[in-house]
Image (cartoon, grey):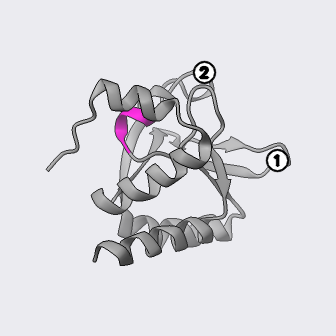
Amino acid sequence: MTWKMHDKEFASVLALPGDRRYSYFISKVADWGLVWSLASDDGWALAADDEGHELIPVWPHERFAAACATNNWAGYEPRAVELSNWTEKGVPGMIRDHRLVAVFPTPADKGVIVSPNRLKDDLDEELSLIE
C-alpha cells in the first residue's frame, strides 16, 4: 500500500516548525516503515552543520525529499530505505563515520539535527506504541 500525499497536507506540514516536523517524521516513519533520503549515482546526499559535521538528510515521504532536490542536491532523487535496514545498517554506519541526521529539512529550513542514536531511540519508542 502506498501513502498518497495530498497537496493540502504537503503544504501544511512544510510550514510547520522543526520540532513539529520532527514529531510528524517519527509518526509517519513508524507507520509506514520507510525513511526517505536523496541519492544520485555518486551516493547519498550530504549536508553540513555550522561546526562542519556531515549530516544525512531524511524525510518521511518521497514528495518532501523531492522538494529539496535543488541547488546542491540538484540531480539527486528520492530513495526509500526500509526502516529495519536503516536502523540495522544505516545507524551504525553513521555512528562509525561521525555523521548526524538532519531530520526533515525543507527548502527554507535545515531540519532538526540529531544523533543517529537519538533518532533510532525515538523511532523505537514510537514503534513500541503501535505494536
Q: Amino acid at mark 2?
A: Asn
Q: Residues within 10 Å of mark 2 (few under 14, many from 20)?
A: few
Magenta residue span: 61-65
| Magenta span contains residue 64 | yes
Left or right: 131, with 38 as reference point: left
Q: Residue at x 38, y 30 (%)?
A: 10
Q: Which mark is residue 52?
A: 1
- Is residue 112 placed above or below 68 in the rendered structure? below
**Residue 70 percent location from the top left of the image:** 54, 22
Q: Residue at x 82, y 47 (%)?
A: 52
Asked if one can make out residue 88 in the rendered structure from this viewpoint, the answer is no
> Of helix, strand and loop, which mostly describes the magenta segment?
helix
- Is residue 74 placed above or below 104 in the rendered structure? above
Q: Quadrant of residue 18?
A: top right
Q: Amino acid at mark 1?
A: Gly
**Residue 15 percent location from the top left of the image:** 52, 29
| Magenta span contains residue 63 | yes
Tag 2, which secondary structure? helix
Q: Earlier in the sequence, mark 2 or mark 1?
A: 1
Tag 1, which secondary structure? loop
CB of mark 2 within 8 Å of CB of mark 1? Answer: no
Label 2 sits on residue: 71
**Residue 62 percent location from the top left of the image:** 36, 38
Q: Residue at x 52, y 40 (%)?
A: 42
**Residue 128 percent location from the top left of the image:** 37, 78
- Is residue 131 placed above or below 46 in the rendered structure? below
